Amino acid sequence: MLAITNARIYTVTNGVIDNGSILIEAGKIAAIGAGLDIPPGARVVDAQGQIVTPGLIDEHSHVGGWEEGIGWEGNDINEFTDPSTPQVSILDGINPADIGFADARKGGVTTVQTMPGSGNVIGGLMLAMKTNGNIVDRMVIKYPSGMKAALGENPKRNYGTQGKSPSTRMGTAAMLREYLLKAKQYDAKQSRGDKDFKYDDKLHNLAMVIRKEIPLRVHCHRADDILTAIRVAKEFDINITLEHCTEGHKVADVIARNGVPACVGPSVWQRAKVETRDISPTTPGAIIKAGGKVAIITDHNIVPQHYFRIAVGLTIREGMPEDEALKAVTINAAEIIGVDDRVGSLEVGKDADLVIWTGDPFEPLTHCVMTIINGEVVYQHSGEEK
Amino acid sequence: MKAFINAKIHTVSGESYEQGTLLISQGKIVAVGTHVDVPAQAEVVDCSGKVIIPGFIDTHTHVGMWGEGEGQSSYDGNEGTDPITPQVRALDAINPLHQSFADARMGGVTTVQVTPGSGNPIGGQMCVLKTAGTLVDEMVLLPFNGMKAALGENPKNSYGISRRRFPATRMGTAAAIRGALNQAKAYLEKREKDEGTVLDLRWEPLAQVLKGKVPLRVHAHRADDIVTAVRIGEEFGIKIAIEHGTDSAVIADFLAEKQVPVNLGPSFWHRAKIETQAVSFETAGVLEKAGVKLSLISDHPFFPIQYMSIAVAMAHAAGMSPMGALRAYTLSAAEIVGVDERVGSLEAGKDADFTVWDGCPFSIRSHVLETYIDGQAVYTRE
């Protein structure tokens, strides 16, 4: 048994506990509160003067699939041979030895959704995983957790410049519709038990979206791309999330009204593309103000995992309410991924994924003291490094 | 005349004051301290609870010359048609109306060095300018302040890997730089012997490097690239400054001994290339302890210049002294680019370039409320 004592605990779902303790047993939170009896024999971590939060959750990353500082050898997120590849899965492209996982643990990030890139109109299946381990199948906590799709510049740059379809936003949306319609027809045939039903590995995966078993997670930066994503979702009656949502502040009311989760970021970034020219850390706050649901994302390795917390801090500086900022990288992210039964808040029965910080987690001068995943200490500040 | 009273003031060059006054007039600082006589005619601004520091100085940026969301036609950073282009000037590619200058002012950056990119072994002439204005010639502090050179991955990517042209290796890149310096040397010797020598726009600026008027500012990430830069500098007896210096921690003592300054960064970045695997905020503290002169850089747009206060804070969080970190983005930066007589600290006689904050500049929750350049408010937070 592990006991963390004397901490200021941000449970996220049940307020803040001062001078609180957390008891951890068999990888789960066994008890949490002030004035808990610490069982004899428990390993005690005294967190006097320190802050405990749930492990941070990054809804949109490419950790393990897009290794840093390596060329094509370490980049496995875009199957660039065909603009529609729902049959591929990021599960087969993740290297648990990627330094990004170590960065995540050091930065207090305990769960990431890691996904295919945005080079294809339909990019493939994604998953959610813990950031500690060496066998990807054992790190996974939800698979599949979504199907990747992409609107805007990336698909048309990758294919249109080679004289292939799609070469416009119209073409991208048309291809997305074409495949969704095929998947719908495929699913209907399969459920009716039609004799001429024939297995198709692309449509098999995409049919999960049609049946609402998983959402379509749509890369969209510009406001009109955001609206296209919502339009397509309504046409096919599917669940979607908005990935990046760079101009979300311009259509915040539409996002809120449609109840579509906005996964915003990366915000500490250059205006790398025309479609990101209005990038701003004010976006998450604006969507929250309009009544929308927000997760903040890294798009790792665009923002490295260990600086995730700083990207969150910047949104606070530009108007994101403090409690909403913490929710955006814990419980909201967990709900949007669909893993909130296990992670995202500090509650009895949930996975013991938590972080001890020297102070406010979003301040540059704070550092992570200890990261715990499934009750196991997976990172400890050595005192030498800072 | 304007007096900012009751402010917490960090002069950087000297004392910090808990309840200080900063007196400015005609674009210059008149006085700073706790016992400043405020003339009756001065406009008084009460800065209780606020913090005043010198305007930030960024020694390595592409402000005004690098496309940011405007599409391909707006990239003017690399004259990528020839590996050796000492004749080109950053000054001719700077758009003062570009968003990046507004970003700089918003982030409290008042002076920037603007440099050509690192695609060419010799990339062109750098300049130093203030971040407010509409006419670049009026913003300039130093029109030719250094010659950009580049080692490592970028030149070989630009020529050898992508176009099968020279140079394709680190050997080739160093040879290209040496070749150009030798050409310029021959030109300079001829010119000194024979006044009738025709002016050569390509070799003349490199001759200024050879004469010690301006340094060769060398893009180098890997430790061996940094050492190559120092080696070439010693061979030609020229001044060298290191740009980026990602691996410089492992050779900090060498750099201190050689008195080579490092414009370090961008540190808030992913390991974008093989040569940037060691990127870390800890490097700044290691260099400081070894006695290496350093400044912190944004390399804007690669790290957005408006967020550089966070990078300064992170350098402190990772081991640099708090005043060392602040100095590395103000006075040390001014010294490295040679404009410390005018900017970099709050001292009587210097330009009135400073920022007013609503809290400690190291906190992510603090905002720049106002940025002043030459005594004029050039940014006010809404």
Image: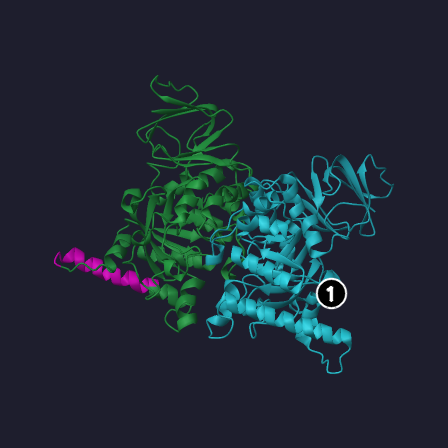
Chain colours: A cyan, B green
Determine the residue located farthest toward the left in the rendered image: B196
Main secondary structure found in the magenta portion: helix
Residue type at tag 1: Asp
Magenta segment? B177-196
Looking at the picture, how far across and down is residue A204, in whole percent?
70, 73
Is B180 one of the magenta-colored residues? yes
Looking at the picture, how far across and down is residue B328, in whole percent?
45, 41
Residue found 76% across the figure and 73% down from its top: A191
* Position of residue A331 in the picture relative to residue B314 (left or right): right
Query: Which residue position holds label 1?
Result: A137
Q: Is residue B260 in view from this perspective?
A: no
Looking at the picture, how far across and down is residue A269, in whole percent?
51, 52
Looking at the picture, how far across and down is residue B300, in whole percent?
44, 51
Determine the residue located farthest toward the top in the rendered image: B40
Q: How many marks?
A: 1
Q: Is residue B110 in view from this perspective?
A: yes
Residue found 52% across the figure and 57% down from its top: A224
- Corner quadrant of residue A215: bottom right
